Image (tube, rainbow, N blue to C red):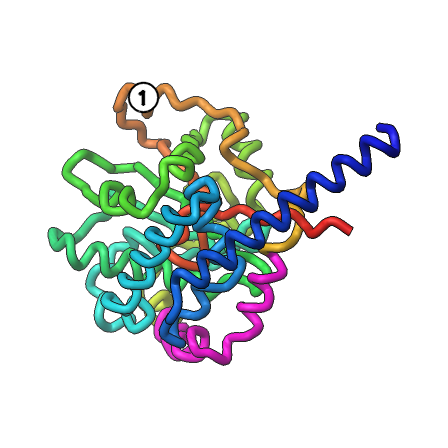
Amino acid sequence: MSLKNSEANGSLEKALFEEKRAKISEVRKLLEPVPDKLLLYCSDASIARYLRARNWNVKKAVKMLKETLKWRLEYKPEDIRWDEIAQEAETGKIYRSNCFDKYGRSVLVMRPGCENSKSTKGKIRYLVYCMENAILNLPSDQEQMVWLIDFCGYNMSHLSVKVVKPFLEPKTSRKVKFVYSDNQASLKLMEELFNMDELEKAFGGKNEAGFEIKEYAKRMRDDDKKMPLYWSQGNSKTSVAAERSAMAEPSSSSLDISELNSDESHAANGEENSSFKQILTNGDGKSIGDKQVEQLPQEPK
């Protein structure tokens, strides 16, 4: 590339950067005033995610973010505690795994075949609790989580997957991939994402420890004690990390699962298979309302 072309590209890149910064500032002005407890969701990082989810349309991003802020104020997801939803968790239908993936993302396991409740309200409240807990346990430089869904024993009378659907943008839904225990391509996919010594045996790993409600309850109660501090205004570490992440170049080592190949024919035909597993990555970690996690380009020098 010639020096002239390089300078032209640099100028264009800087112009795009400044345009995006201007839109972030515009969204922030349209949101004001924002309650102190919700300022974490109005950082540059968070606003950038909403703008991307709406193709940098300021009006649509503001509407989407306002709806999220309103929901958080009314629903108060950060106030849900283990003892309130423990009954929903007894069968291990949803839980946070002890392990993280290779990118430091929290891993949530869902087993629709273990559904134990007919209360839609209870299911949603437990789902929200699990996602908030996954966020709590993310490293300060990570904003994404991973879902592992085991369809063993699943049938259409179970509604857990349908409960999750409203929280997913179509772009996120397309990142869902089906993997199978007897498929080499599936095994390779899992090895790229997880440390197989830590991953549960049910998902092709070597860890034979399964869900145990008493041990899990203890973990959740311990995490509940951390929740008020995490969401307080003093959570500057997370805020700073989120800002840094938003303004950084996407990592070349980041794995976009939507680009990986896998066999989805069984899903398309609606067939039930005992080895059905589903993997979903790039679920946003910072807010259930943040539908798409991407990053702003680094400011040109």
Q: Residue at x 37, y 19 (%)?
A: 265
> Which quarter of the picture shows residue 274?
top left
SS label for mark 1: helix
- Which of 204/192 is in front? 192
Left or right of residue 18, residue 150 in this image: left
Q: Residue at x 63, y 50 (%)?
A: 18
Q: Amino acid at mark 1?
A: Ala
Q: Position of residue 170 (x, y in %)?
A: 36, 36
Left or right of residue 136, residue 120 in this image: left
- Which of 128/51 is in front? 51
Majority secondary structure of magenta residues: helix
Q: Circle 1 sits on which residue?
A: 268
Q: Quadrant of the N terminus?
A: top right
Asked if one can make out residue 281 in the rendered structure from this viewpoint, the answer is: yes
> Which quarter of the picture shows residue 85?
bottom left
Asked if one can make out residue 208 in the rendered structure from this viewpoint, the answer is: no
Task: Judge the density around disc 1: few (<14), some (14-19), many (≥20) Cα neighbours within 10 Å.
Answer: few
Q: Residue at x 69, y 46 (%)?
A: 14
Is residue 230 found inside the magenta-colored segment of the image?
yes
Is residue 133 found inside the magenta-colored segment of the image?
no
- Magenta part of the chain: 220-245
- Which of 119/95 is in front? 119
- Which of 124/201 is in front? 124
Q: Point out the residue furthest to the left here.
A: 118
Q: Residue at x 56, y 45 (%)?
A: 194
Q: Position of residue 9 (x, y in %)?
A: 75, 36
